[in-house]
Image: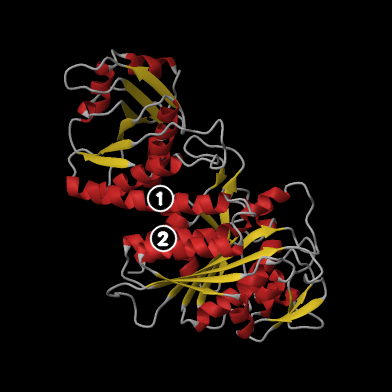
Amino acid sequence: MESQALTENFSEANVDALAVVIFKGEKPSSGVLKDLDKLAGGHIAAVLKSEEFKGETGETALLRIMPSGKVKAGRILLVGAGDKAEYRLCDVAVASGTATRYLRKCNVKSFALLPRFDGDAAAIAQNAVQGSVTSQFELDKYKTVDKTDKAVTKIVVFVESSKAADLKKGLIRGQVIGDSMNFTRDLANEPPNILTPTEMANRAQKMAKETGIKCEILDEAKMTKLGMGSLMSVSHGSEQPAKLIVLRYTPAKSTGKKGELLALVGKGITFDTGGISIKPAEGMDAMKYDMSGGATVIGTMRAIALLKPSVPVIGIVAAVENMPDGKASRPSDVVTASNGKTVEILNTDAEGRLVLADAVAYAETQGATQIIDMATLTGAVIVALGDQNTGIMGNDQELVDQIRDCGMENGEGFWQLPLSKEYSKQIKSDIADIKNIGPRGKAGTIMGAVFIQEFIDKAKWAHLDIAGTAWHDTARAHQAKGPTAVAVRTLISFVERSQ
């Protein structure tokens, strides 16, 4: 997608349409809005006065104008942004995405955006481009008919009296972040017969080669040698071999604290039947998304490789398929993880924590001092938080707070749930060190987290349960239904704050 910076003469942009953010209750009484209303023959004022268009978030109204003189555009799109007092930088991405999706339907190829946000020009441009790029992702990759073939190919971002160089820097960053989010979403949307653990590893390798970072794939023989009995127990029932994907970004010159290493760890269950504790048939098709945590890690590492922060980061994905056959784990099996702890498996559908156990333990053996894991781990988090907030827990409050702050900055909500020794006591096993589920119907999300915590030794650690936020069942004004790439922007911000 082509992007350009504009610092003056918004109405003269060489585009098919002009898109302008409008707030609730606003009137075009001065400035650029007044000028645009003149171009539209007073129709902006008329539409606002009649309350045909109220300025609610996601609302749109298209007005036609006659190109003349220096004005090239033939349309003006009003894009609602809600209350002005609540308008944040991350809402620029929502407005841009809303404009792009609407104008694409009208077969508009290019538009200029007036985001109307006061702040850092580069950040405004970044959000505008990212929102436009991610808005055009669709689920129709494998369709042969009725495929979306319209696209907006150019966005011009206007920030008055800013430096063009600052805007251009933001445009480049926005493209990288948007493309990396769509890369994440494409992985998550793949059918499980195509995206096997092997294929997931292949795509990670290809991405690493293209972006210049290192990639190592541990096969089952290597994982068995390392004692990863917890992870391997999930793979036994599948004909598809498990893979541990290890991505390493090392900056040319590090400005981070000596000896510090951040590890991003993702659950990559490419399909989850539940194993012997098999899931109900209804809704099982959504279990292709059970590798969304792993996709988030790979997509974030792609962005990190291209943005080149000055701190090292390692990305680890446990890619496994959970299937039932004669070799599958049974409820009551006992397995030994790589840190020596024994686990009684009482439910084979609580498999995500089993693979993450060995993955986070491996991260520490690689020198990780901070670990952030992410997983579509529990249905309980959906009951508790719905699709608006990701559940977050951890052993270090400062780390949790930093992630939450980065999430707020990027329009991604994280709600902290408690961890305590009293919860940990509820996964003690009668015949092994721990069991992989807690009491039925009680604190399911927390039980998953305290299990993973058993495999953290000294590292500062945070766990993100993205089961409710990794995909949406309905489309939004700025985004298609399906995978969301949740946490990619938050993690990028977290890494860059660590410089």
Image quadrant assignment for residue 256: bottom left
Tell me the tag on residue 167. none
**190, 88: nearer the viewer:** 190
| Residue holding disc 2 | 302
Q: Amino acid at mark 2?
A: Arg
Q: Amino acid at mark 1?
A: Asp
**438, 223: nearer the viewer:** 223
**353, 298: nearer the viewer:** 298
In the image, residue 335 sits, relative to residue 397, either above or below, namely below
- From the top left corner, tell me how far across and down residue 309 is, in percent: 32, 66
Label 1: few (<14), some or many (≥20) within 10 Å?
A: many
Left or right: residue 356 versus residue 412 is right
Task: Answer yes or no: is residue 75 visible.
Answer: yes
- From the top left corner, tell me how far across and down residue 471 is, in percent: 58, 48
What residue do we see at 27% from left, 28% from top?
A: 15
- From the top left corner, tell me how far across and down residue 252 is, in percent: 28, 73
Q: Do the numbered discs 2 and 1 sit on residues whose CB atoms are within 8 Å?
A: yes
- From the top left corner, tell me how far across and down residue 124 is, in percent: 31, 45
| Residue holding disc 1 | 179
In the image, residue 361 sits, relative to residue 127, either above or below, namely below
What residue do we see at 79% from left, 52% from top?
A: 280
Alpha-carbon distance for marks 2 and 1?
9 Å
What residue do we see at 45% from left, 27% from top?
A: 105
